[in-house]
């Protein structure tokens, strides 16, 4: 009796386990495919640009030095202010140079009177032609010496050679200065406009030229290349600049090429030596394919990959070539094409070959037809 009871109990357990397995199988089969957010890729024209580090430098720099020797009598400017071209900055003691002018004037008058007297005597042939020519030459020499003396007297008034903001003074009243000494009295920086020198790797310059030659890039528009500026605190500079020239040589120590841009600086916000970032437009990439950064990851080898909803809404893993970022997206050179659907949401639920339920992604901002690259 016990044996029959045990057999009946075993049969009941077996049936229960079988029914449980069937229920789990039915539940597994009935589970819906995971929902994923996708973005359909589109080909579009993209404005590519480079974000390059640089520093500001004055448009003009003039070092003020004396042209004559003497004692500084006065300083006639306020340090750190804006001075104008021709404004007097210093006064050197003019007494010696004034005396030299007066002496030269007397010599000039004597030589002139003698030359005029010889002119009358030459007409009567009372003197030779050689004596007359010597008197004329002495007169011209005296005129030149007087002109030199007057120039030296004028040089005692040290004038600003350019408009700009003047530095602190390196000398004070009573200081002895020498003609064209190595130490400048002060320096003047013209800051409006102002230059920004940025550096770009020579490899990037070569890449850009190759893409332009191959037709992958076209120039953004006619005229000068426009440059936008970001200050060292991260704020954008309100004025837009223009690229003026590219250095013709590569710096052997850094492997970089210097590019110079010019910016308006009416408020004097930019000062020489500031660290900035310049954004230069490179050109327009025709029919480029951009993928949101949320849809691109890296495998253990560091290669870029993306999950794609393929035929039959099945998951596919693609290895792609993503060369650079464009705003919040990747510019894809190979591995993806327009019309394909890239998964940007729910990637953690995706496995190769499984069926998916694609819906429009909510974690990707809308893309403009032309954007800037960073």
Image (cartoon, grey):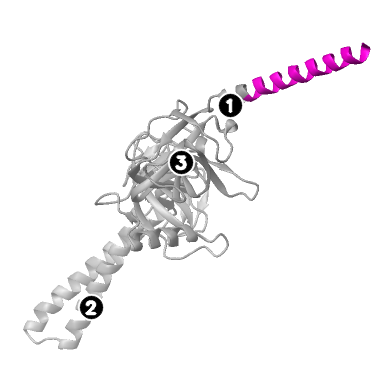
Q: Position of residue 95 (x, y in %)?
A: 40, 52
Inspect this view and state whether residue 299 appears: yes
Quadrant in the picture for residue 190: top left
Q: Which residue is mark 2?
A: 137
Label 2 element class = helix
Q: Which residue is mark 1?
A: 29
Label disc, if present, on residue 317 of the rendered structure: none
Q: Which residues are magenta?
A: 1-25
Query: Which quadrant of the rendered structure holds the N terminus?
Result: top right
> Which residue lies at the image location 32% right of the left edge and 39% below the top edge?
369
Nearest-to-viewer mark from 3 and 2: 3
Q: Position of residue 70 (x, y in %)?
A: 46, 54
Q: Is residue 38 magenta?
A: no
Which residue of the protein is positioned furthest toward the left in this rendering?
124
Inspect this view and state whether residue 89 appears: no
Instruction: Estimate the spatial distance between the alpha carbons at disc 1 and disc 3, rounded to whole Å.
Output: 22 Å
């Amino acid at each position: 009796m016990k044996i029959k009871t045990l057999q009946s109990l075993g049969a009941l357990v077996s049936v229960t386990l079988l029914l449980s397995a069937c229920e789990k199988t039915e539940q597994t089969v009935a589970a819906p495919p995971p929902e994923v957010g996708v973005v359909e890729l589109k080909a579009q024209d993209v404005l590519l640009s480079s974000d390059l580090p640089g520093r500001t430098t004055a448009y003009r720099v003039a070092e003020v030095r004396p042209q004559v020797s003497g004692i500084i009598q006065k300083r006639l400017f306020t340090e750190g202010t804006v001075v104008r071209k021709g404004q007097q900055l210093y006064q050197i003691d003019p007494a010696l140079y004034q005396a030299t002018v007066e002496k030269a004037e007397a010599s000039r008058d004597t030589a002139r009177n003698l030359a005029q007297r010889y002119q009358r005597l030459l007409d009567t042939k009372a003197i030779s032609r050689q004596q007359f020519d010597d008197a004329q030459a002495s007169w011209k020499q005296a005129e030149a010496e007087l002109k030199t003396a007057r120039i030296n007297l004028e040089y005692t008034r040290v004038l600003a050679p350019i408009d700009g903001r003047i530095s602190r003074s390196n000398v004070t009243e009573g200081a002895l200065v020498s003609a064209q000494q190595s130490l400048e009295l002060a320096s003047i920086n013209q800051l409006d406009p102002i230059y920004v020198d940025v550096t770009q790797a020579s490899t990037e310059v070569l890449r850009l030229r190759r893409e332009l030659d191959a037709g992958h890039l076209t120039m953004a528009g006619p005229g000068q290349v426009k440059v936008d500026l970001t200050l060292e605190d991260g704020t954008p500079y309100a004025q837009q600049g223009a690229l003026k020239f590219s250095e013709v040589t590569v710096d052997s120590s850094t492997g970089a090429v210097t590019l110079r841009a010019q910016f308006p600086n009416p408020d004097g916000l930019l000062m020489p030596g500031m660290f900035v970032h310049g954004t230069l437009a490179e050109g327009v990439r025709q029919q480029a394919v951009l993928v949101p950064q949320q849809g691109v990851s890296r495998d253990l080898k560091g290669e870029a990959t993306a999950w794609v909803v393929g035929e039959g809404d099945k998951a596919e893993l693609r290895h792609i070539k993503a060369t650079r970022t464009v705003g919040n997206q990747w510019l894809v050179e190979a591995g993806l094409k327009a019309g394909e659907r890239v998964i940007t949401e729910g990637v953690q639920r995706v496995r190769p070959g499984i069926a998916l339920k694609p819906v429009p992604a909510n974690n990707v901002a809308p893309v403009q037809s032309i954007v800037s690259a960073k």
